[in-house]
């Protein structure tokens, strides 16, 4: 088996035709065979467009991250050989890296400005999986890959593992699959777990950040099981109510700018408007997810 050839493959581009096939199958089974799911043509079209633009824009900006990762290769502590075992090990460690990244972009407004795009639909479907931000190389969280490089993993392998993780996550954005076998639900992120993550219900906020392995959420106390009596209410706490791709992609950056240019607040407050959790405000007039959950738990 030529492992070098495998990790050098462009996983995302190879997967794209399968993404579209899966989206088509989901539409057919929902529309014509009464499977679970909510399909909206306009919502799906916007999501697919944003996904294609994400591939283009993030692809053009990828040199920013790639140059940094390859630069750190010269400072590696070890030279880890490429084997099946090291690929699996790198994937597991990179999945922990993804969990950390995902948690940060939900809890830091600068990161949320990129990731909010993905949560802007009030539905969940395979097409929604493609609704991705266009600025991921500017959030800073891509550099969480650096420790993996320093340990001794080939940068190409690290990039491959991240892409493979993203491909897996595409298939968990659906209502058509209710539950998978218990052993699988216990270890892996699944459609059920990820529906919780996309819910704005107070009890589902800030839960299930996992990429592939749900074990990280269980380990770090951010796991919530899908309650059959509490169906996820998808979308943002304050719905965006637009299908304009530019507004979807950049609205939170605009909101940050408006807060940052205020003349009636201190530099400290400006810093918090950029890096505090979404919903933070200097006068307490807005609500963070922690505020919403606290109010819910005291009812």
Image (tube, grey):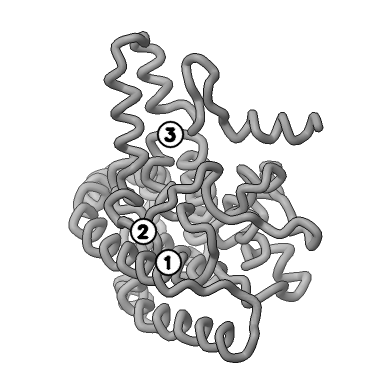
State which tag comes first along the sequence, 1 or 3: 1
What SS does tag 3 mark?
A: helix
Label 1: which residue? 43
Relative placement, left or right, of 71 versus 130 is: left
| Label 3: few (<14), some (14–19) or many (≥20) C-alpha neighbours in 10 Å | many
Q: Residue at x 81, y 32 (%)?
A: 299
Q: Position of residue 187 (x, y in %)?
A: 69, 63
How far apart marks 1 and 2 lie (CA) works out to 7 Å
Viewer-side label of 3, 2? 2
> What's the mark number on residue 109?
3
| Label 1: few (<14), some (14–19) or many (≥20) C-alpha neighbours in 10 Å | some
Q: Is residue 77 visible?
A: no
Q: Is residue 282 visible?
A: yes
Q: Is residue 253 above or below residue 114?
A: above
Q: Residue at x 48, y 53 (%)?
A: 119
Q: Is residue 197 above or below residue 161?
A: above
Asked where in the image residue 49 lies, by quadrant, the reply is: bottom left
Label pair 1/3, CB-CB below 8 angstroms: no
* Nearer to me, 40 or 294: 40
Q: Is residue 2 above or below residue 286?
A: below
Q: Position of residue 124 (x, y in %)?
A: 54, 65
Q: Residue at x 57, y 29 (%)?
A: 287
């Amino acid at each position: 088996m030529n492992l070098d050839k495998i990790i050098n493959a462009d996983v995302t581009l190879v997967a794209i035709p399968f993404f579209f096939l899966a989206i088509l199958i989901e539409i057919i089974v929902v529309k014509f065979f009464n499977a679970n799911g909510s399909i909206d043509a306009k919502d799906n079209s916007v999501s697919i467009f944003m996904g294609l633009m994400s591939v283009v824009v993030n692809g053009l900006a990828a040199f920013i991250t790639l140059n940094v990762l390859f630069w750190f290769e010269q400072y590696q502590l070890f030279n880890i050989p490429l084997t099946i075992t090291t690929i699996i090990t790198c994937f597991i460690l990179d999945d922990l890296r993804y969990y950390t990244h995902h948690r940060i972009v939900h809890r830091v407004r600068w990161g949320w400005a990129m990731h909010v795009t993905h949560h802007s639909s009030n539905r969940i479907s395979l097409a929604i999986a493609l609704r991705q931000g266009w600025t991921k190389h500017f959030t800073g969280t891509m550099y969480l890959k650096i420790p993996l490089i320093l340990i001794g993993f080939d940068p190409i392998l690290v990039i491959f593992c991240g892409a493979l993780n993203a491909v897996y996550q595409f298939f968990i954005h659906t209502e058509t699959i209710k539950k998978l076998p218990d052993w699988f639900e216990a270890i892996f992120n699944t459609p059920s777990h990820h529906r919780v993550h996309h819910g704005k219900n107070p009890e589902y906020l800030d839960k299930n950040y996992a990429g592939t392995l749900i074990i990280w959420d269980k380990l770090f106390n951010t796991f919530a099981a899908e309650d059959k009596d509490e169906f996820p209410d998808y979308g943002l706490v304050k719905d965006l109510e637009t299908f304009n791709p530019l507004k979807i992609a950049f609205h939170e950056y605009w909101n940050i700018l408006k807060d940052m240019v205020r003349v009636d607040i201190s530099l400290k407050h400006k810093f918090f408007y950029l890096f505090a959790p979404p919903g933070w405000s200097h006068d307490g007039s807005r609500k963070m997810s922690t505020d919403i959950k606290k109010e819910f738990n005291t009812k």
